[in-house]
Image (tube, rainbow, N blue to C red):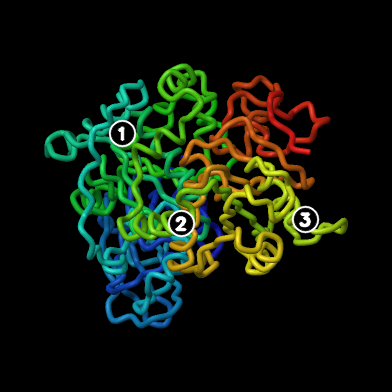
Amino acid sequence: ERARQRLWSSVWYVAAWFVTLNLSDSSFAQIDVLCPRNREMFARTPVPIMVHVFGDMASDPDLNLVVELDGVGRVLDEPVQEVIEGEIRDIANGYFTLYMWLEHKGRPVQDETLALNFSVRTDTDDGDLVHYIPPRDAARPRVLHWLVSPRDEEPPHPAPASSDTTAAIEVLERFAERQKKVMNDPALFREAKFLVSRHYPTSGMGNLFQSLVSAFLVALLSDRIFLHDAFLVEEFLDLPRLTSSNYSAVFDYFGHRHVATNSQWFLYTGVQDWMLCDSLDQHLTQQFAFIESDQYFAGLLVNNDHYALRLHDWFGDSLFGKVSAFLFRPRPSIALEVRDFVKEHLAGRKSIGVHVRTHTLGHPGFIEPYALNDGQGHFLNSYWKCAYYAGGASGVPGDLDAPIVFLSTDNGGVIHEAVSWFGGQLVYKEGPISRSDVEGQRSALVDLLILAECDHIVTTQMSTFSYVAHALASKVPYIVNFQGACVRDISSEPCMHAWRHVAAAAPCMNGDLPFTSTVETRNCGYYTQQSLTAPQNCEWIP
């Protein structure tokens, strides 16, 4: 339930969108600001205004909604009705404050004023979209088509039907066929329920895949049409088995007013427990359900008593690998770049993919382990030795039987160190190292897909980029953990970071603190040989 906020001072800046304005002790009106949202950025004008008004006084003919733009004056003064629409024209680039209040017979209601901020950037390009985090509960699509790179390549043909007759393929193909039927039948389409997946634009490539697969699982289990509204998905991936999975086309059909008044928004940050304890139908009640996250919350669903047996029957211990193999294809230009690199550098040789992450992203516990020097010699040596052990070599650089080592890293200094260790055995892909622009994200995806092509993969503990590389290929990885140990994990599946925090607080767990339950909820590389929480069958490398 969206929060309600009473307005008693002269100006309140919007923190909650559901606002109650009291007109008297017994009568009131409520306004829900649908557009613009606080902090929203507009890439073109006019800027639309849409306000939903309801409550006892909503039909009072003497009640008006007034909207004023800072520095401009009144831009809207309309009698109250269920949905009030307007627009702001002739507005320049900049940062603006918008004020709203109700007037009864021309007099402000207790001088109460609602204020929110928005910006206009008509010079926006695709790089800005990567930085921009829109309000999570805005109905308008985030994928602005005039900013997406044109698809000048041949569109991919639908993926051929798989010869695999496993339960997973049968379930996924049945879902795809139903989505196709609904999207092509106007009557079914109008009555359908939708699950819209959104992704934090500033999170990395691994987070994108994890949240996308998790949201798809919610759509599968709740029998909803799966849509995405993420710029990087539109830019880099195709979903050839699903008919029209882009949210914006559906939005255009139904219109802003319908979507905004028939939607609910969920932000999953890693600590909510409702997907672990409850049936999805208890929470997903509106026609449009938006889930925004950068987490692998699929781990909650596979441990949810409502779905655990069903999911295990369908996917076993390879949920991510099977779902992603069914759903995703990189755009042809990206797939070709990966294929050419693999053919030139890796074909015909045993290969070890090594992912070394050094960027901390502000996580305080990661600073020391991700440093290049741990105070006892180079921490990077753990990666190089782990690569040799993973490849079956002796661990001595220069062995003739040592494999080709492909390096993916976010730090140019790591490349320099690796060259001095591996020499001609090392290969890497030149490209920008950045998650803050489109080219950097594209380069990251190419690296990720090359890692997945390697025979063995050495990863960095807690890196979602690492998780997705080995999960896409269903290859059990080696982990260099924060203690510098090299350990072979027990599964190729991504790891859910916040499992123990969620499980400890979840009412359905009755206060129990499980060490782990499924492979998705193992301890994410926090293994020591003395630890009671380490998987019993993980392989320790000396």
Q: CA distance from mark 1 to mark 2?
A: 28 Å
User: Dots 1 and 3: beta carbons under 8 Å?
Assistant: no
Q: Earlier in the sequence, mark 3 or mark 2?
A: 3
**Callout 1, which amino acid?**
Arg
Label 2 packing within 10 angstroms: few (<14), some (14-19), many (20+)? many
Visible residue check, residue 404: yes
- In the displayed structure, 129 sits above or below 456; it is below
Q: Say which residue label 3 marks.
A: 379
Classify mark 3: helix, strand or loop.
Answer: loop
Mark 1 is surrounded, within 10 Å at the Cα level, by few (under 14), some (14 to 19) or many (20 or more) other residues, namely many
Question: Which of 447/216 is in front?
Answer: 447
Q: Specify whether 158 is left or right of 268.
A: left
Give the quarter of the figure containing the C terminus.
top right
**Identity, as a three-letter code, of the amino acid under mark 3:** Phe
Q: Is residue 22 visible?
A: no
Along the line of sight, the residue nearer the viewer: 494 or 74: 494
Q: Cβ–Cβ below 8 Å for labels 3 and 2?
A: no
Residue at 61% x, 52% y is 354
Locate residue 495, reporting x and y percent: 59, 37
Q: Residue at x 45, y 73 (%)?
A: 97
Kindly identify the residue that appears in the image at 56 percent across and 43 percent down. 467
Residue 2, image x and y in percent? Answer: 46, 44
Taking depth in this image into account, of 301 and 173 the one nearest to the observer is 173
Mark toward the start of the polypeptide (1 vs 2): 1
Disc 2 marks which residue? Answer: 445
State how far apart marks 1 and 3 are (Cα).
Answer: 47 Å
Q: Residue at x 42, y 65 (%)?
A: 40
